[in-house]
Image (cartoon, grey):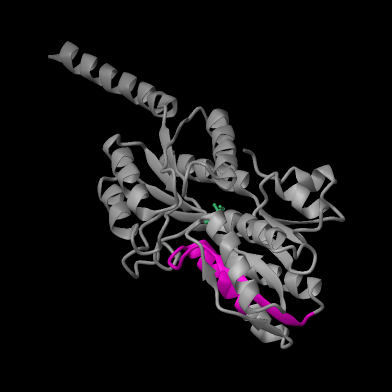
């Protein structure tokens, strides 16, 4: 009996010694679901996420839909949940429509962190509301981004005239907030500027270009446009060029694909507001890993902007924030 008891005690001690080592050696799998796969913003976010995954010995799975749409994103999310990753990082394509699909992950015990966009109000872990279950929100301050855009456009047009916002579609937290910040700043501090009705392009640059020309046809005194994300901005800029209004109709662009450099240098785009998507991806993976290994994590992490224009775009400390392709 004594021998059995001693052996059992030994086994418990051995297990205690081995268990922490096993926990540390566990290879975590973290899934990153972007808004869409073919967008320099999310491609750059993936790079940052991969850098953190490599540093931490985590397996990163990047899986997304080809367009920015809840109808195509939700099946991707379902497929990811079925594979039971240790954590999910996701840029939800709609504030409301992704709540229930993400709750499935939460109910299955998979921690959820949202990157770039949020669900519900974006204020998580409050115990209030139906969409506060994600652990953290890691993103740019998009209201501030809209305000920066408004100030840049106001400066470019001498603080007077007609402008409008080229936007994706209502319901996306980021682009809704950029429009909100833009309009708030214009209303508060730029009385000489009239903001015309927003044009929604469904993330289709060609549509944004046609809309620019239609708005210009109705308002030949149009002086500026704010493209509220990468495709809206590229499309609006193309529309300005096609209308033969380069330099006359000023363009402020959110996001910084490499093609923006030419557009800035030729004067088609006055200012581009680059986000720091690699930072978002990096801190997304670090936060998920911290949570999985028993650390507490911030409920929100804000990343910054780099404002690009003709005067600074050649500076490597600025151009390093251009997105990857
Ligand atoms: O502007 C980014 C992102 O922040 C937004 O949520 C959706 O559009 C982009 O991915 C750019 O295309």
The magenta segment: 159-183
Number of marks drawn: 0
> Which of these two is toward me, 141 or 222?
222
The spot of residue 265 in percent (x, y) is: 82, 52
> Which of these two is toward me, 323 or 231?
231
89 over 25 or under it: above or below: below
92 over 85 or under it: above or below: below
Residue 116 part of the magenta segment: no
Which image quadrant shows ligand 1? bottom right
Q: Is residue 124 visible?
A: yes
40 over 230 or under it: above or below: above
- The quarter of the picture where the N terminus appears is top left
Residue 178 part of the magenta segment: yes
> Position of 33 compared to 276: left or right?
left
> Position of 39 compared to 67: left or right?
right
Q: Residue at x 39, y 55 (%)?
A: 134
């Amino acid at each position: 009996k004594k021998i059995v008891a001693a052996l059992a005690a030994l086994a418990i001690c051995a297990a205690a010694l081995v268990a922490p080592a096993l926990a540390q050696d566990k290879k975590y799998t973290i899934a990153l679901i972007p808004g869409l796969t073919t967008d320099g913003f999310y491609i750059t976010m993936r790079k940052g996420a991969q850098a953190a995954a490599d540093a931490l010995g985590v397996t990163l799975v990047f899986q997304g839909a080809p367009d920015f749409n809840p109808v195509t994103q939700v099946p991707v999310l379902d497929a990811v949940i079925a594979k039971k990753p240790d954590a999910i990082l996701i840029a939800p394509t709609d504030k409301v429509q992704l709540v229930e699909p993400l709750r499935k992950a939460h109910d299955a015990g998979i921690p959820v962190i949202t990157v770039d966009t949020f669900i519900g109000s974006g204020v998580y872990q409050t115990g209030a509301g139906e969409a506060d279950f994600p652990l953290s929100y890691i993103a740019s301050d998009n209201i501030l981004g809209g305000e920066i855009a408004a100030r840049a456009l106001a400066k470019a047009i001498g603080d007077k005239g007609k402008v409008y916002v080229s936007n994706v579609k209502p319901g996306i937290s980021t682009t809704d907030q950029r429009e909100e910040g833009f309009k708030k700043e214009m209303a508060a501090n730029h009385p000489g500027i009239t903001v015309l009705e927003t044009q929604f392009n469904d993330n289709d640059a060609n549509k944004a270009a046609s809309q620019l020309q239609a708005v210009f046809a109705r308002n030949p005194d149009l002086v500026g446009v704010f493209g509220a994300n990468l495709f809206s901005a590229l499309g609006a800029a193309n529309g300005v060029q096609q209308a033969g209004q380069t330099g006359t109709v000023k363009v402020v662009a959110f996001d910084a694909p490499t093609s923006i450099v030419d557009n800035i240098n030729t004067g088609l785009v006055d200012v581009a507001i680059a986000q720091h998507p690699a930072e978002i991806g990096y801190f997304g993976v670090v936060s998920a890993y911290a949570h999985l290994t028993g650390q507490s994590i911030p409920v929100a992490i804000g990343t910054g902007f780099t404002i690009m224009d003709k005067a600074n775009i050649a500076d490597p400390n600025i151009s390093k924030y251009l997105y990857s392709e």
